[in-house]
Image (spheres, rainbow, N blue to C red):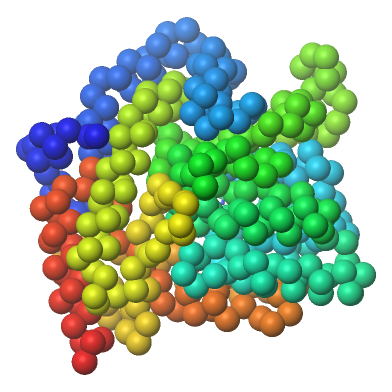
C-alpha cells in the first residue's frame, strides 16, 4: 500500500486537483527513475539495450504470459498482432464502437474492415449478443470474419468466458486490447494471459505508463511470438540485414524500459490504491449517479473512474465542476461508428444503442493512485452539488 504519510505530506499537496497526477507519482518514485535513466545515458545503448529484455522478463513474470514483447506503442502492438495474423483487405475484424480510435485504426490501417459491435451498458465492454448477431450478419452477407478484438475499457476486462466461447465456436481468433487494463484480472486469470494475444500501452496516462510512447504484446503462442519479434525489426530473419517479411520499426526505447522497470515495482501498490479510491467514490456517489460496476470475478485497474449521468445536462455538470477547479473528462463523446473516418464501416445489425447512450451520458472523475482522501472528499462534495439540479 502506498504509505499514508506520503499521501498526506506537504510534498503531495497539489496546487490544483489533477485529473491524473503524474507529478505526484514522480515525487513518490524519488531518485529511482532519474538513476535508471542516467544509467542508460551512461551505457548509451538507446535501442534494444539490456533494460528492454529485463523489462520484458519482468512483464512476463507479472502477468504469467510466456512471451512479453515490447514495442513502440499500444497502437503498434495491435498492428503487429494483426500483421502476424496476415490480416488484409477483404478480412473483417469485429471490435467495439465505444473505444479509443486505435482499436479500429489498427484494423482499417491494414486495409481490412472493422465491424462495430455494441457494448453492454453496465460494463462498457463488448456485448455477447451483439457480437453473435454481427458475426451472423457477416456470414450471411458473404463477408469473411477472421477475428475479434475485445477491449478492456476503463481498466475492466471484457467478459472473456462468453467471448472466448463465441470465438472458438465461430473459428475466430481473439485479441485483447488491454491498453487500459494491464494489471487487472478475470476469473483468476491475469490480463496478458487471455486470448491468442493481448496488447497493452505504456502511454503516460495509462495505469502503467512510461515517459513517452510504448507498448507490448503478450502471447503464449511460440510461433506468433517469433513472427512479432521479426516484425518489430523490419521483418528480420537470421540477422538485422536479412529481411524475410515486410515489417515495422517498432521498439520500446531503452530509456522507457528503464523507467518502466522502476514503475512496475510500485504498480501493485498503485493498483491497490486505485481500487481503494474507486470503492470510496462508489460509496459516496452511489445514491446520486450511476456508478461503475465490476463484473463478478473480475478486477479493474481503474484507468478511468466513469459515471453515467442519465437525465442530466453533462455540459453544465462539467462546467460547474470546472468552476470549483475539479477537472473531468469525457471518454468517449463520439463512438467509432459515428466518426467521420469510420462511419462507412459495417455495424451490428440492430444498431448500437448502448454505445450511443454511453457516449451521451458518461463522464470521468480524477483517478490516480496519489489522490488523498481529503482531495477525494472535496471532489465528491463538488460532484454531489453539481448533480443537485438533475435530481429535482
Ligand atoms: C491508449 C489506447 C490504445 C493505443 O495506445 P497508444 O500507446 O496510445 O498507441 C489502444 N487501445 C485503447 C483501448 C487505448 O485506450
Q: Is residue 73 above or below residue 51?
A: below
Left or right: 219, with 283 as reference point: right
Residue at the image point whose x is 24% and y is 75% from the top: 287
Q: How many marks?
A: 0
Residue, far left: 10
User: Which image quarter holds the N terminus?
Assistant: top left
State the image quarter where residue 218 is shown: top right
Q: Is residue 19 visible?
A: no
Residue reaching furthest to the top:
43
Picture quadrant where residue 282 is located: bottom left
Residue 368 vertical placement versus 67 (above, below): below
Residue 205 screen position, x and y as percent = 40, 46
User: Residue lying farthest bottom?
Assistant: 392
Between 53 and 212, the residue placed more toward the observer is 53
Quarter of the rendering occupied by the C terminus: bottom left
Residue 209 relative to residue 29: left or right: right
Residue 79, compared with residue 247, is above or below; it is below
Asked whether residue 114 is in view, the answer is yes
Q: Position of residue 248 (x, y in %)?
A: 73, 34
Residue 369 placement (x, y as % from top left): 28, 43
- The quarter holding residue 143 reads bottom right
| Front in this rendered view, residue 263 or 171 | 171
- Residue 319 % position (x, y): 25, 75
Residue at (32%, 84%) from the top-left corner? 312
Please, is residue 109 above or below residue 204 in the view?
Answer: below
Q: Residue at x 55, y 20 (%)?
A: 57
Amino acid at each position: 500500500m502506498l504509505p499514508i504519510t506520503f499521501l498526506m505530506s506537504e510534498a503531495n499537496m497539489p496546487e490544483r486537483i489533477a485529473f491524473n497526477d503524474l507529478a505526484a507519482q514522480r515525487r513518490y518514485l524519488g531518485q529511482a527513475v532519474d538513476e535508471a535513466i542516467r544509467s542508460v545515458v551512461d551505457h548509451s545503448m538507446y535501442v534494444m539495450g539490456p533494460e528492454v529484455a529485463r523489462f520484458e522478463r519482468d512483464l512476463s513474470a507479472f502477468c504469467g504470459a510466456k512471451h512479453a514483447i515490447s514495442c513502440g506503442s499500444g497502437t503498434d502492438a495491435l498492428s503487429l498482432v494483426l500483421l502476424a495474423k496476415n490480416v488484409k483487405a477483404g478480412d473483417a475484424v469485429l471490435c467495439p464502437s465505444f473505444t479509443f480510435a486505435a482499436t479500429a485504426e489498427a484494423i482499417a490501417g491494414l486495409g481490412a474492415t472493422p465491424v462495430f459491435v455494441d457494448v453492454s451498458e453496465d460494463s462498457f465492454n463488448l456485448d455477447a449478443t451483439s457480437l453473435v448477431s454481427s458475426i451472423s450478419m457477416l456470414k450471411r452477407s458473404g463477408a469473411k470474419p477472421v477475428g475479434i478484438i475485445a477491449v478492456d475499457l476503463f481498466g475492466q476486462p471484457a467478459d472473456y468466458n462468453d467471448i472466448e466461447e463465441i470465438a472458438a465456436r465461430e473459428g475466430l481468433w481473439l485479441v485483447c486490447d488491454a491498453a487500459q487494463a494491464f494489471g487487472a484480472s478475470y476469473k483468476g486469470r491475469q490480463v496478458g494471459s487471455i486470448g491468442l494475444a493481448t496488447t497493452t500501452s505504456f502511454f503516460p496516462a495509462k495505469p502503467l505508463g512510461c515517459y513517452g510512447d510504448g507498448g507490448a504484446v503478450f502471447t503464449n503462442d511460440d510461433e506468433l511470438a517469433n513472427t512479432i519479434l521479426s516484425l518489430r525489426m523490419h521483418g528480420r530473419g537470421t540477422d538485422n540485414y536479412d529481411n524475410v517479411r515486410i515489417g515495422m520499426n517498432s521498439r520500446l526505447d531503452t530509456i522507457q524500459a528503464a523507467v518502466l522497470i522502476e514503475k512496475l515495482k510500485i504498480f501493485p501498490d498503485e493498483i491497490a490504491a486505485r481500487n481503494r479510491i474507486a470503492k470510496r467514490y462508489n460509496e459516496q456517489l452511489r445514491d446520486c449517479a450511476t456508478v461503475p460496476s465490476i463484473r463478478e470475478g473480475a478486477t479493474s485497474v481503474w484507468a478511468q473512474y466513469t459515471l453515467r449521468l442519465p437525465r442530466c445536462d453533462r455540459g453544465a455538470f462539467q462546467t460547474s465542476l470546472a468552476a470549483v477547479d475539479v477537472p473531468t473528462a469525457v471518454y468517449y463523446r463520439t463512438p467509432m461508428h459515428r466518426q467521420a473516418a469510420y462511419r462507412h464501416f459495417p455495424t451490428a445489425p440492430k444498431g448500437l444503442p448502448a454505445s450511443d447512450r454511453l457516449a451521451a451520458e458518461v463522464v470521468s472523475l480524477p483517478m490516480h493512485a496519489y489522490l488523498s482522501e481529503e482531495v477525494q472528499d472535496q471532489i465528491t462534495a463538488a460532484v454531489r452539488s453539481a448533480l443537485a439540479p438533475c435530481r429535482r
